[in-house]
Amino acid sequence: MTPPVSLLAEAPIGAGSIVAVWPWAAPGWLWALGAILLPILLHLFSRGRSRRVLVGTVSWLRPARALRGRRLRPSDPGLLALRVAALAGVAVALAQPGCPARAPEARVVSLVDPAVAGLLDAGDAAARRAWREFVAGAPAGEHPRWLIDGFRPADLGAEPAPGAARRSLGAAADDAARLPEPHLGSLLLEADRAEEHPGTRLRVLAVPRAAWIAPRATAAWAVGDEGIELPVLRHAVAWFRLADPRPNRWIERATRQAGRWRILEGWSDGAGLRFARREEPVLEGTAVRAGAPLAPPDAWPLDDAPAAPPQETPLAIAWAPAPGTPLAMRRAAEAAIAAAAGALDLAWTWSDPGPAGGVTAAAPETPIDVLVLAGWGAPPAMTPPGGPSAESPDRVAAPSARRAPSPGSSEEALRLADTVARAGGVALWIESPGEARWVPCDRPIRWRGVGGNPTEVRSTRCLAAPVEPPPEHAPSRPAGAPDAHPDEAARRGGRDALARWAFAREAAAAGAGAVASGALLERRAVGEGSIWRARWPFAVAPPDRSWAEVWPATAAALIDEVARRRGRLVDSVRASSDRRALALDQIPAEAAGPPDGAPTGTRPAAGSGGVPRERASDRRLEAAAWALAVACLLGERWRARRDAPAGGVAR
Amino acid sequence: MARAGDAASAAPEPASAPRAGRRLLDPRTLQEIGDLRLVARAVVEGFLAGQHRDPRPSEGSEFTQYRGYEPGDDLRRLDWRVYARADRFVVRESQGERDVTVRFLLDATRSMAHEETERTAPGGREAPPLRKFDVARFLVASLAYLVDRQGDRVALAAARDGGVEALGTGRAGRELLDGLEALERLEPSGDWPPLEAALARLAPRRRGRELVVVVSDLHERGEEIRRALAALLAFRHEVLVFRVVARNEVEFAFQGDLVFEDLESGRRVAGNAERMRRPSLAAREADEEAWRRFVLERGAGWERVVCDEPLDMALRGFLLRRGRLPR
């Protein structure tokens, strides 16, 4: 996609003034320039200490009238200038100015949110003003680039937010907030190129809703749409996310206000992509690699995490978003899972079963280890037929046999999950917060902070799925009344979800907790497999935290659980999880151990005739165990010889 | 410098003055000598070496007394007959030589401690500061030596600490030596005495007129020095005023921002020397002109002595004034 030709013609290519920003390694020392006031003041006021001369009489002495005025003038400008120059030189040297010769080699990458193009096409006046300002600030010869190619804004309207009427993108400002986020893949590419060219400046013109620049450093990313696999970034880059379209105080500080728009500027200095700091030493909401110059104190120590041994056979994770799932939610979930898997250093592949169920319940084409379900409405799987207490909770209701599952319904998702679970895989059901509700908890829930934040938040409320209302919130239903449709129950249970979600945000804003993200997993055994469902009690997450920052915990826990069940990577993965400070304390007790009857060794791969998979790590573990045993035996013999008395008779 | 009535201006510069003699008259050279008796002798001898006429008066013919020889006495005045008889040196003194008393009144107030800025001795060495008082002391010693050599009576007095004190024991024949010893120990202090205290010492004690030589910087708070001079003139004394000034005063050779502090009153005046030079020099010239006019209008002699200049001009002016005295 390209910007409108008319607007591109307005771009003053070559006429933009290059603002020469001198690179300073330690600009804080520039404050030391204030020290030049010291010699000036000393020079002026030292004149008051005149030399004393004893004379016979002062009766005929006539003091000059302009003595005071002259005292304030430097008597020795040369000496004063020398002192001032010496101090200024020291201050500048401490500030470590960069080599100005590198300035012409600086590279500027200008990226424009596609939503801007949509609004420009719609004739939005604010968008035109922002565009002109953005172009005017571009250096000579630099053409702004659009983030998403071939993805016209008109197409974005096909996936409006649920419940919102479809309108033209430029018709209302609210539509801009519903636009998808800038394409992470393109941005990653640009960021990766920026890493190769220190001094590259990255300019982003984005709608102030959800502009994120790059994920964690070690996060591998694959773009499923075009099948492009992007390289893993060598360095950590900034995580910059404008999650909330509403005015945000750190956005106000970090970005330049251009009407309703924000213009972000960042550059790469070899240590990572950084964004311009206006007032704050570290942008709030920005996570940088630990040890980087701009790393916040609670940056995640990605580089310090022990690397898990690679899997020879990658896990297959299937991603099954429901039809109609908001694109933003899909992107966030994808990023979260990718980041979590990448952080755990697990080789993995990506397969998108597609909205129609590329993974069919009957015979999935590829063995699926993990199935991620999202946006499938209210999952009736946890609801035993006939009410919550009618049957054992371990029994999972079978898909409704009375009628065929409608596309996009929870029953279809349940069939997929059931298929994967029966094959030994794990299904992760991700609910959107809007489908959950607040319920009082019978015991306090402690949430541990993420990112090394030791803050613990006690909460007596949690979000519960609408299909599992507590008894006091159970829908009153006359006896003998027919069961309500699960989707109907979901809608009924989610009526006040938004209000409670708003309450959660208010609680977070009031300081209920810095960051307390986590996943409350609930597992139900299904045959040999299980279905995992994640509840999202993220009420204590600040408003500027979004799903993408929360879901990695669940995804990591999921992968951890998969590995644990199979007896692989138990220690290393769990250690990695601990390093990431994932708040898994609240996992129910049944999740701590393998489910009853679950296979702990290899499992027959679906579609492979039940041939067990041989793992190289098994052989390595076995060899290591044997080596350890032999070493212990030899060590015992050596110690017995050493402790034997010299010259003694060996028994 | 050359003004009407100025004794120094009336006397031409002796063109035949030996260079060594001129050098010996330099106050900085005298400062290195230290001993006032040697200073006085060097000054007088150096000065007299360039004179065409021996200014010494002839000895009196009327014998007065013998006295013992003391170092410094002219050997020609030894009575060799007495030596042949008694085997001791005696000096013959005659009556009539001591009819005129020359009284030196030295200003020894604190203002005389004013120092010259230049501290370089003739040999290029750094010398101690040359004060007005030092120059005045050299001048008094030299004049006293000259007077004594001329056969006149010498009386030394210093005005300081609110009074006038006589220098020396006053014994007959030892006025000069005792006076020079006392003068050597004298240091400036205090203020000029009031008129009553000055009159108690300056009033004539015997018949005859006196030559009163006032050596001072003429710095006064009120008009105490003027009153004293007027009183001396009222006693019909012959008065000769030597005003001692420093070179840095005459030229205002100061630089930079300075705080000038009055040695007597302690009053301070701060200012930039360059900016103060012109008005201050004008005020000082006016002050000196007023003093000169005051002195000359009353029939007294006026001589100005600059600290770093040789003393021959002062000696010449003194001799001219001395010649006006009746014998």
Image (tube, helix red, strand yellow):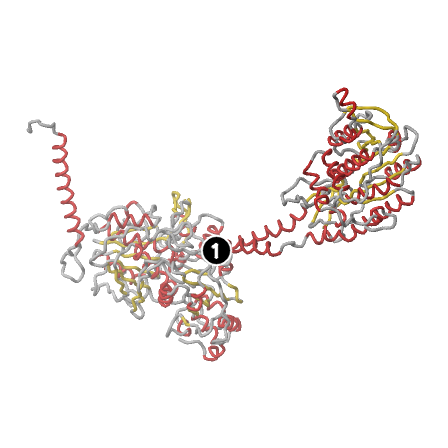
Q: Residue B186, how many percent across, how many down? A: 75, 31
Q: Chain for mark 1?
A: A
Q: Residues within 10 Å of mark 1 (few under 14, many from 20)?
A: some
Judge by depth and name the residue closer to the eye, B39 or A515.
B39
Residue A237 visible within the image: yes
Kindly identify the amino acid type of the residue bearing the numbered disc 1: Ala
Q: Is residue B216 above or below residue A319?
A: above
Residue B192 visible within the image: no
Q: Residue B49, how many percent across, how many down? A: 75, 42
Q: Residue at x 90, y 30 (%)?
A: B204
- How many labels, in total? 1
Check disc 1 and report the residue beneath it.
A93
Which image quarter is the C terminus of chain A in? top left
Which image quarter is the N terminus of chain A in? bottom left
Judge by depth and name the residue closer to the eye, B29 or A466.
B29
Secondary element under disc 1, as helix, strand or loop, is helix
Q: Residue A288, how many percent across, how many down? A: 39, 55
In this picture, residue B208 sits left or right of residue A197? right
Place residue B130 in its image quadrant.
top right
Q: Is residue A408 above or below residue A56?
A: below
Q: Residue A648, how many percent across, how many down? A: 8, 27
Judge by depth and name the residue closer to the eye, B24 or A450.
B24
Judge by depth and name the residue closer to the eye, B57 or A209.
B57
Q: Is residue A182 above or below residue B5?
A: below
Q: Residue at x 34, y 46 (%)?
A: A586
